[in-house]
Amino acid sequence: MNNGLKTVLGAAICVAALAFLVASQGGARTLSFGAILPLSGANERVGKAEEAGLSIAEEKLEMFFEEGNLRVLVRDSEISPDVGASVAKDLVEKENINALFSSMSVVTAGVSEVARENEVPMFYDSCNCGFAQANPYALQLFLDPRKECKQVAEDFYLKASVSAIGREYPLTAAYVGQEVPYANFCIDAVKETEFSVLVEKDVEGIARPYEALFTSWKAQGVSFIVSIPPSAYIVEILEANETSGAQIPFYCAASQCLTDDIVSQVSPEALKNVTAFDFQIREEFIEEIQLKIGKKILSRDEIVGAAVAHDALVYAATAASRCGEASVACIQKNATHPLIPLAIVSEGFDEGRILKYTTAYTTPK
């Protein structure tokens, strides 16, 4: 059999298989999906990447729905909770959307209440587990600070146990970052692993003498530092960790603390102290989003944003196709068997509706 005939037969088999799958799942299901993204302002670049991620998913998912039965409506949040809430209300009341995606914590604070009141499933890209705790229709499609900070603490606890002779208790860690609700999720997770935690949160407009802070932390036996979300003074902090001579292992989220802008301002020596955690994203998706946007080199926050938005639509469409609606229960039930491959390597959502993903660690080169 020649290669041309093999190709034709292979394509025919794929089409037949897809046709059978669509028919077996009803085919005529509907989904109206609303995405509230930062399409203007400081995060416009990430918002455009999220929009591209949605487009990739939509193009692939259309085969599972009759024409016109899959709608993806994108709106600009202007990075405002009030605008986000207004847009969400408009989508629910005028467009009859039955699933939402909200980008950025500050916006989700406004959108979540609208989703809760109208019983609309809402995916969000924030480390703030509090949204999922307060809203039974919210699904966190982002890093879990409890998981990441606890894992770092457990790793250092094991290292300390191996060399326990002569070690003084308690074990000490440190947190430095923003004064936001989900900082405490990280701090509390570290405390669960027999570490006391020294805490330094941002005070707006005030940069501390960080070299003195790190010198003090080193003297107090701080084993490691966690920072999620990172301080507004992250550049100064990373540099001070190096120049003070403390050189304490520093852990943070790659898409937050290793952005192109931050890395360009920090010396290579200071970056050697940093280990960043993030999602594991399929290489195939990274290639797809590069092609879609038309850029070979994308920043980590663009790739993550695109992947999260892509997967939100996949989860919602899978539920709508299989259950006739994108209910939270159906989303959770079908999350591990999506209609098309997900961008993020994951195993669905836990009982608290937090994504169960595979962590990837990055150290700057």
Image (cartoon, rainbow, N blue to C red):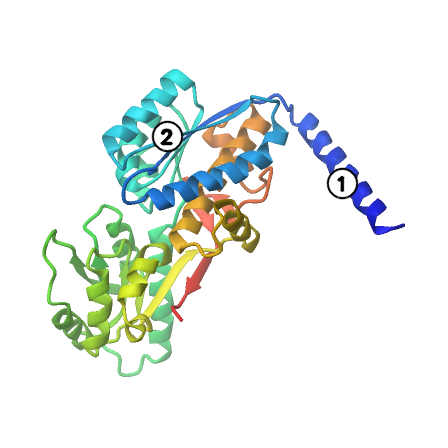
As drawn, is 323 to the left or to the right of 76?
right
Quick one: 189 or 141, which is closer to the camera? 141
| In this view, 80 is above or below 358 | above
* Rendered location of residue 253, percent (x, y): 34, 57
Quick one: 343 or 220, which is closer to the camera? 343
Residue linked to disc 2: 75
Residue linked to disc 1: 11
| In this view, 138 is above or below 141 | above
As drawn, is 61 to the left or to the right of 128?
right
Q: Crowding near pointer 1: few (<14 within 10 Å), some, many (20+)?
A: few
| In this view, 32 is above or below 299 | above
- Place residue 22 in its image quadrant: top right
Q: Which amino acid does label 1 sit on?
A: Ala
* Rendered location of residue 234, percent (x, y): 23, 61
Q: Is residue 327 visible?
A: yes
Alpha-carbon distance for marks 2 and 1?
37 Å
**Tally of numbered discs:** 2
Mark identifier at residue 155:
none
| In this view, 230 is above or below 110 | below
